[in-house]
Amino acid sequence: MLPLAPGRVRGRLPPMPRTFSLGARIASFAYALRGLALLATQHNARIHAAATLAVCALAGFLGISAGEWLAVVLAVSAVWSAEAINTAFESLCDLVSPDHQPLVQRAKDVAAGAVLVSATGAATVGLIVFVPRLVHLVR
């Protein structure tokens, strides 16, 4: 069993802070920004970054509508969110179970599958938004 943090009682959450602290809020944003470093460590995140740049460039070139931008931004955000959660989950699994365990592998595969589902949805949005405009350009 993993040791507890100092002052933590098993089965109880630490007390919530009672006052607002601007410094704590700023620190929480710094931690979140540090978490975006997955570009430095995750190959698939770099692929997502290249796809995001390509999609944004194509959307700008084709002059898509505000509603289409909304769909594209939501789709891209879903993929990035799934990739970040998958990365965090895999890191936690590797910490808790450094040796190969079939159930841990299954959980990691399911998390990776969630990224695939979101990427497939984003690709579908891309087809719906871009294909009609690209076909119109060719004609």
Image (cartoon, grey):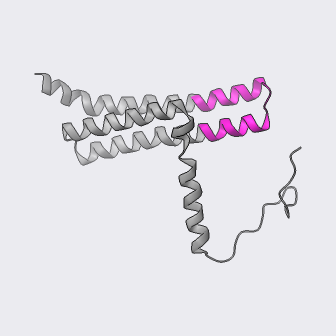
Residue 59 versus residue 19 in the image, above or below: above
Verify whether residue 100 appears in magenta: yes
State which quarter of the image contains the C terminus: top left
Toward which corner of the image does residue 48 lie, by quadrant? top left
Q: What secondary structure predominates along the stretch shown in magenta?
A: helix
Q: Where is residue 22 shown, x and y percent of the image? A: 57, 74
The magenta stretch spans which residues?
87-112
Q: Who's the residue at 86% across and 46% down the image?
A: 2
Q: Is residue 94 left or right of residue 111?
A: right
Q: Who's the residue at 59% across and 29% down the image?
A: 112
Which residue is at the front of the view, 12 or 37? 37
Q: Where is residue 114 shown, x and y percent of the image? A: 56, 32
Q: Who's the residue at 79% across and 33% down the image?
A: 97
Q: Where is residue 1 shown, x and y percent of the image? A: 89, 43
Residue 72 versus residue 24 in the image, above or below: above
Q: Who's the residue at 26% across and 38% down the image?
A: 59
Q: Residue furthest bottom?
A: 19
Toward which corner of the image does residue 108 lie, by quadrant? top right
Residue 14 versus residue 47 in the image, above or below: below
Q: Is residue 122 left or right of residue 39?
A: left
Which residue is at the front of the view, 9 or 125? 9
